[in-house]
Structures are given as structure tokens and as C-alpha cells.
Amino acid sequence: MKDTFEATRGPSPRALERLGRNLASISDRLLPDPFLLAILLTLATGGLGIVLAGEAPGRMLRYWGTGVWDLLEFSMQMCLILVTGYALAETPLLRRLINWLASLPRSSAGAAALVCAVACVTGALHWGLSVIMGALVARDTAVVAARRGIRIHYPLLGACGYVGMLVWHGGLSGSAPLTVATEGHFLADRIGVIPIDATLGSPLNLAVLAALMVFLPLVASRLNPSSPEQCQAVPLKIMSAWAVAQRGGGRAPVLTVGEKAADAKQSAGVQRWTLASWLNTSPLFGVLLGGAALVWAVELLVERTVAGGTFGIDLNVLNLIFLSLGLLLHGRPISYVRAVERAAGATAGIILQFPIYAGILGMIRSSGLLELGVGALVAASTPETFPLLAFLSGGLVNLFVPSGGGQWAVQGAILMEAAARLGVSVPKTIMAFSYGDQWTNMIQPFWALPLLGVMRLRAQQVMGYAAVLMLAATPIFLLALWIMPA
């Protein structure tokens, strides 16, 4: 078969590629499991409260215990963002879309660019959708390319599928902007409610999003190894599962062999008509609930937008919209239930870690560490440099608190108070934090776990290329925060 591998035009950025691999290697050696990081951060915060704020150990423990359940509503909102996005990505309509997208590339560079572009667009729409959609498009694009004789580098496509997490916090599901746009959020007594027009809809954020969506696919298209021998092929298990799905008549090869076997077993158990089987498989009730919920969500969105003069979306409205769309597009209620069951495992980190973050926030607020942190930020900053410092601090803390929502719970109060004292725009500070949080996702593999499972990859194979994309995006963030108004 004719070798259709195409070397990328121009020199590949080998220095950046090597640096990315080194950064990923350091991260892999030094950073333990994210839950252990949350524990270590708790101990460090308690120690700082004792040493710097002069609090007794017993009082720090009391502050932690008092705050540990303060973010239960927020935790559920974050779980629903992930679950509803994941379930939507598994609808038949999106599966057909994935098949069509996977058939488009005709070269290795085109495959990397397409996967990166899809991940960016879906990341801007909904991070939970992007996590699974990026993985499925990357996997199926790699399989189709391999069957056509195109030599792609499979780990590179994995990194491209993960890049949605480099744009998500400036998109419609951004935790910090949506949180401060929600009535009664945990910082409402300090900053009030900040409409998303001032954050996600600002010229600053729209310019950053546009630049990332154009520039990142271009960079991805030039990262494929110039030699065919350096390309890593699609794992045989992935190729086999794809072939099994095709032989089974599925239009979209997105289920694993185990999932298809479970579906077959379930189907065999309901072959005889019963009232229960009809209720489970009839699309009537899913469509009724999904349609009614969507009508209410749209009505609420319009009402808020008209009353407030700004786009009235928040976490609750967004989750309701995606829940409605998932029910409508799955049709059968039992199909949606199965998709949610598959998605639920990915919420374990949120469920386990958010109470720990809430306890940390309780210690920071009650011990005086908040005031100390604000004072240090104010002393180290000017109104001009503070957004850059907020960005860098967001990136650093994200390595230890790999959740945008949990991180905002820990950092939000400090950043908002410092911004107020320096006279810096609150919306710009929120976006600076958001960019920092998403920036270092590329070297923090916590949210890559669903993608790694779908693609049968190890974090070490993906993080090097993801780090290159992170470095490529860095000038966009810094220049925008430096020269653009809020």
C-alpha cells in the first residue's frame, strides 16, 4: 500500500517538544494522586495558619471541620456538568457526527489539526462534553487514518483530544465566571453577582478564545514526528473494538467490547414484552421530560436576560439545558440512564475532593490567612501587573488543586479582595485566574483520565505533547492580559 504519510512542512519545534517531554516527566515523578495532593494542601494550610496566623492546632481543625460541607451545592453542580456533557457525547446524533469528522483528514497533519479544533470548540461549549468528545474523535480519527494507510502518531492525537481543557474556563461552562454569575454564590457578599457579559462575553475573553482556536490547531499540525519510524500506531485492542462495532452494524464505533456485551445482555433480558420493558424503552417519557425541561430552561434564560440586560446563563441553567438535550437526543430513558452510569465514575474526584477544598477554604477564611494572602499579593503587585500575577498563581495552584471549581473555592476570596484593594477590574481578575487554571491542565493529567481510558494511553505518552501546546498558548494569555482592558 502506498505510504500516505506526509511530513509536516517546515522544521518541527524539536526544542519545545523535548522541553514538553521533560516537563511531563518531572510532573509524573513529583506529583502524586490528586486526592493526596488535596490532603497535603490541607496540612500545609493548617501549618501556615499555626505558624503565620498564630492559631492553635485545635482551632485550625475546628475551622476545617466547620467549612468542610460548605460546597455541597457547588459540588453537585460540578458533577452534573461532567455527567450531562459526557452523556450528551454518547447520543446517536453526536456518534454520527464523530464518524463523519473522523473520515475527513487525509494526512497526519490534518488529523492532528482536526482533533485539536474539535476539542477546542467543544471545550468552549462544555468541558464535560469536551473531555469525552475529544477522546472519541481522537480515537476514531486515528483508527480511520490507520485503515487508510496514513501514519499518524497516536499519543499526539491523544494530546490534541485533551486540548479542550486549555480553553474551557473561558467557555460557556467556565466554573469561576458561571459561579459569580449565580445568585447567592459563596463570594456574593464581597463582589455581588457578576454577569457573564463582563467575563465570558468580554472583548478580552472573545479575543483569547478566537486566538486559541486558530493558533492551537496550527501548532498541532506541525508536531507530528517527521519520520514514520517515530510514529506510534493505534493499539490493536482499539482497532479490534472498532472492527467489532462495525460488524455489529453500529453506525458509530464508540462503545468498547465490554459495553457492547452489556448492551447485548440487557437486550436479551427484555425480549419478552412487559410493561416495564415498554416503559424503559419507549422514547415517549424521555422526550416529554426533556422537552418540558428545555422549554423551562429557555424561558428562564430569556426571562433573566431581559430582566438583567445581560445573558442570564449560570451553572444551574446550563446543567438543565444539557440534561434536556441529553434526554431528547437519547430518546429512550434507559439509554440515557446507561450513559449517565458510565459517566458517573468520572465524578469520583469531585465527590471526594471538594469537601477537602471546602475545609481548606474554611481554614483560610477563619484563621486570618486570607488577610495575609491578600496583603502579600497587594505588596507584590501593581494594578498593571496584578492580572499577570493572578494568572500565574492560578496556573501554579492548579497543579495542586486540579479542579477549576475547587480551585476557585480556595483562591477566589484572596484574589477578589486583592483586586478590590488595588482597584483592578474584578471581571478581568476572574478571567486571569480562569486562564491560569486552564493553562496548566496540560501538565496536570487529572482531567485526562477519561480520555486515557477511552484511548488506552498512559499519561506519560500524552503529557509531553500537551505541554508543548501549553507553551504555545502562553504568549496569547500574557499579551491579552497585559494589553487588553477587561
Image (cartoon, rainbow, N blue to C red):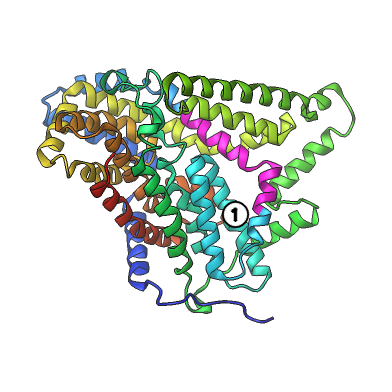
Residue 483 visible, this angle: yes
> Horizontally, is 459 left or right of 192 in the view?
right
Whether 68 is drawn above or below 204: the answer is above
Residue underneath mark 1: 137
> Horizontally, is 161 left or right of 429 in the view?
right
> Horizontally, is 337 left or right of 171 in the view?
right
Residue 25 in which image quadrant: bottom left
Q: Main secondary structure of the magenta part?
A: helix
Image location (x, y in percent) of residue 433 = 30, 40
Whether 373 is drawn above or below 455: the answer is above
Which residue is most to the bottom? 2
| Closer-to-camera residue (103/233) | 103
> Horizontally, is 211 left or right of 121 in the view?
left
Region rendered in magenta: 77-98
Residue 457 visible, this angle: no
Tell me the SS state at disc 1: helix
Quadrant where the C terminus sits is top left
Q: Is residue 234 magenta?
A: no
| Closer-to-camera residue (62/395) | 395
